[in-house]
Amino acid sequence: MSTASGRAAATDRGSLARRLATVVSVVFLLVGILGFVPGITTNYGDMTFAGHDSMAKLLGVFQVSILHNIVHLLFGIVGLALARTAAGARNYLVGGGVIYLVLWIYGLVIDKNSGANFVPVNNADNWLHLVLGIGMIALGLLVSRGVARSRPGPVRV
């Protein structure tokens, strides 16, 4: 393959990385917004700013608090900012995936009825964090090869 066609493939992968990071970011923004919508979030009146005593659940399944929703919104905003470049998009996907795997482990080891569960998380959140972590890392690695080679170089024919 010539360097020119290699650059074209790298550009396509870079564009794909940016699109994937944008989609993931928009989903996080949507989740953050929906966490503040009564009806979509059950027990909305029992939502606290933070802590395990927040009884609000997004879609009746995922335990949320005001802080939890803000974290989703910020994660979405950061993702949109990083999705402006291919390298930033890749870093968001892989780095965000690592963060979610750390959150999964954290959710497994803490006592869910203690002050350590300040975000808060429940078992459904833990499984979602595992899936998000693996999924985001997989997407980031899928596009990494092409993104790493997306720097301009000499054209060879």
Image (cartoon, helix red, strand yellow):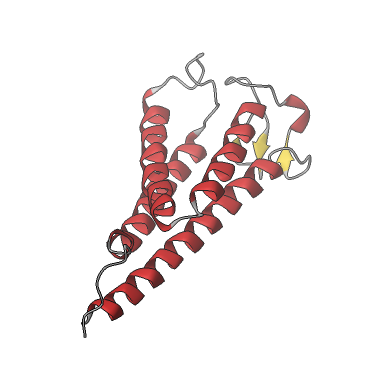
- Where residue 79 appears, as percent x and y from the top left, is 52, 47
Q: How many marks overall?
A: 0
Question: Is 96 or 77 nearer to us in this picture?
Answer: 77
Q: Quadrant of the N terminus?
A: bottom left
Decide if residue 66 is on the left or right side of residue 112.
Answer: right
Q: Quadrant of residue 108?
A: top left
Residue at the limit of the structure toward the bottom, as seen here: 157
- Where residue 86 appears, as percent x and y from the top left, is 42, 58
- Where residue 136 appears, as percent x and y from the top left, is 41, 52
Decide if residue 23 is on the left or right side of residue 137.
Answer: right
Q: Residue at x 40, y 64 (%)?
A: 14
Q: Residue at x 47, y 45 (%)?
A: 128
Decide if residue 23 is on the left or right side of residue 143.
Answer: right
Q: Quadrant of residue 75?
A: top right
Q: Residue at x 52, y 30 (%)?
A: 121
6 above or below 71?
below
